[in-house]
Structure formats: C-alpha cells, structure tokens
Image: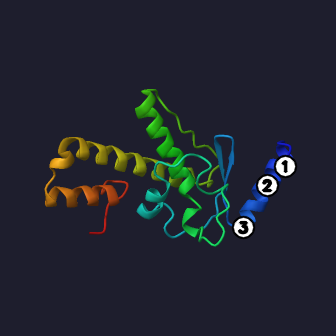
C-alpha cells in the first residue's frame, strides 16, 4: 500500500464503515468521531486490557478472529496514553499527547479519558509506594477500588 492522502482517507473510510474508528499511521493515531454514545467507551475493564501493551499488540491493527472487539474500539487511546506515561517514567523525559480536530470531533471526551487514565496510574503508584506489601486487608481493598475506578472530578463515582 502506498501512503498518500487518497489511500489514507480510503482506509479510514473502510475502517469507519466497520465501526473501527481508530487507525494508526506509524505512532500517530487517527480517530473519527462516531457521533454516538458507546457503552464502556473507556471503562476500567478496557483500561486494564490495554495497560502495558505496545502499539500493534491490540486492535485496531491486530486481527483477532472470534473475539468480540466491541470493547476494544477505544482502548487504543488508553494504550497510547499508557505508553506515554510509561516512557515518561522510564526515560525521565517529557511526553506530549496532541489531540486536535474540528469542533465536535471528540477532543474533549478523548482528553477526559487521557486524564482519567493518568490520574488512576498516579494514584495507584502513590498508594503502592506508600503501602506496598505491608498493606492490610482494608488498605488492599482501597488499592483495588483506587485502581479499579478512581473517584475524582473526572470520574465522580465508582462501584464497590
């Protein structure tokens, strides 16, 4: 496949028709707003499936036959965020995630998901470093809740 504007647009159009709204071009993630509410969009379950994964290990560009990808349509944003966070910690270098697009393109929802993941990672790391293996049953439950669904201004409620 030759990469030019026409082939890129055609590829995005074909993927969008299959409800695959994300497409990678090298390490750049292209997103097409589906203009609909999607259940489990950035759920904790989805976050956990994409944590620690490298680009190419999970959808959009891995062919998983007989696997329901409905919960994976948006995890690539989480995977990109997780990778940036891990690279920042490992390499001790600033990272940037640029979210751009026209009005209504889904920038705000994407940014909310990015901030949610980072807040969960930071809180989890803080709690683990301060309690670590000495945590008792109550502290362990707090860690599970914090990691599972961190309550904050971005995510105001959680399931216990």
**Residue with the mark numbered 3:** 18
Horizontal and vertical percent position of residue 10: 82, 55
Whether residue 120 is situated above or below residue 19 in the rendered picture: above
**Mark seen at residue 54:** none
Q: 34 or 12, which lies in front?
A: 12
Q: Position of residue 12 (x, y in %)?
A: 75, 55
Identify the secondary structure beneath mark 3. Answer: loop
Which residue does the image show at 26% across and 69% down from the upper left? 160
From the top left corner, tell me how far across and down residue 121 is, in percent.
Answer: 36, 47
Q: Which mark is residue 7?
A: 1
Q: Which residue is mark 2?
A: 11
Callout 3–callout 2 Cβ contact below 8 Å: no
Can you tell which quarter of the image residue 91 is in?
Answer: top left
Q: Are marks 3 and 1 in contact (CB under 8 Å)?
A: no
Measure the C-alpha gap from mark 3 to mark 2.
Answer: 11 Å
**Image marks 2 and 1: residues in contact by CB distance under 8 Å:** yes
Cα distance between the residues tagged 2 and 1: 6 Å
- In what element is the residue under mark 2? helix
For image coordinates 49% across by 39% down, the residue present is 84
Residue 149 in view: no
Examine the rendered structure and indicate whether residue 91 appears above or below residue 31. above
């Amino acid at each position: 496949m030759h990469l030019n504007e026409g082939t890129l647009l055609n590829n995005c159009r074909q993927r969008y028709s299959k409800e695959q709204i994300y497409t990678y071009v090298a390490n750049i993630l292209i997103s097409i707003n589906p203009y609909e509410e999607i259940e489990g969009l950035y759920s904790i379950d989805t976050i956990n499936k994409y944590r620690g994964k490298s680009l190419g290990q999970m959808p959009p560009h891995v062919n998983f036959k007989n696997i329901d990808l409905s919960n994976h349509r948006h995890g690539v944003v989480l995977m990109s965020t997780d990778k940036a966070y891990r690279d920042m910690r490992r390499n001790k270098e600033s990272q940037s995630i640029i979210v751009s697009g026209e009005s209504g393109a889904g920038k705000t929802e994407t940014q909310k998901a990015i901030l949610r993941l980072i807040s969960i990672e930071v809180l989890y790391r803080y709690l683990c470093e301060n309690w670590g293996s000495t945590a008792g049953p109550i502290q362990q439950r707090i860690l599970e809740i914090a990691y599972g669904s961190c309550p904050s201004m971005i995510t105001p409620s959680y399931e216990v």
